[in-house]
Image (spheres, rainbow, N blue to C red):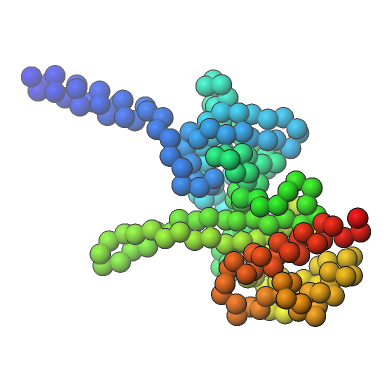
Amino acid sequence: MRITISLFILGIIFFLSSCKSPYFTSANNMRYINGVVKLKDGNEVSGPISSSLADYYSTNAYITVTPNNSKEQRVSVTQIRGISVRNNYYEPKLVDMGFGSHDQLLFLKKFTKEASRMDLYELYEQRTNNSRNGTYYTDVYSYYINAPGKTNEVWNLEGKHLTPNFEDKMSEMVKDCPSLAQKISSKEKGYFYAQVSLVTEKRIETMMNIIDEYNKCGK
């Protein structure tokens, strides 16, 4: 009887461990989520995607994809142009994680269109916190731009590349569009935000105004 029960328990453990149960925290932490991987060589691979990029701190990061439920493939993130998952599009970018941390290659959700001269991205992180009452999680969102001429590097909207003196740094970045640079330099409403501003929505709105006008400049 004990042998039968033991075998039954072992069978359940094996079944649970072999199940490919999907989950999704973010594009950087997901398992068996259907999507499309767009490669830099122009090819695409569709199928369940798994990633754990938050565990990597170098360009050795990779994801796995199982096309048409065939053999699982490992794809280096350096070969990926972007991935489409759950009606959102993400691109791999080298993110400055702050003082004392390594730059990390992560998927960022893209807000701007394909032909944009400057891009805006969102990074979502679920952070673990410990307290006397136990462990709890907080959602953290940060926003980045891919400046003109930059391909893989992105800058935090609150970081040193843009603040303080946003009007000087940003106007210099778009100086090939003099009318826009002037609006930023003179702190025109809708084209400027201060370092002390804590309203994330204002920063996003300001940056989208700048990007939109920059895309139209010269046309």
> How many numbered discs, if any?
0
Q: Where is residue 189, by image quadrant?
A: bottom right
Can residue 77 be seen in this snapshot? no
Residue 182 location in percent, x, y?
85, 75
- 218 sits to left or right of 138: right
Q: Quadrant of the C terminus?
A: bottom right
Residue 168 location in percent, x, y?
78, 77
Q: What residue appears at the point 41 percent right and 30 percent down from the top-left corner?
A: 20
Q: Where is residue 154, by image quadrant?
A: bottom right
Q: What residue appears at the point 76 percent right and 79 percent down from the top-left corner?
A: 187
Q: Residue furthest left?
A: 1
Q: Where 180 sits versus 145, above or below?
A: below
Asked whether 195 or 71 is in front, the reply is 195
Q: Residue furthest right?
A: 218
Q: What residue appears at the point 72 percent right and 80 percent down from the top-left corner?
A: 165
- 24 sits to left or right of 63: left
Q: Where 30 sits versus 66, above or below?
A: below
Can residue 151 be seen in this snapshot? yes
Q: Which residue lies furthest to the front in this view?
A: 189
Asked whether 204 or 82 is in front, the reply is 204
Asked whether 74 or 161 is in front, the reply is 161
Q: In which quarter of the image is the N terminus?
A: top left
Residue 104 location in percent, x, y?
60, 55
Residue 72 location in percent, x, y?
54, 26
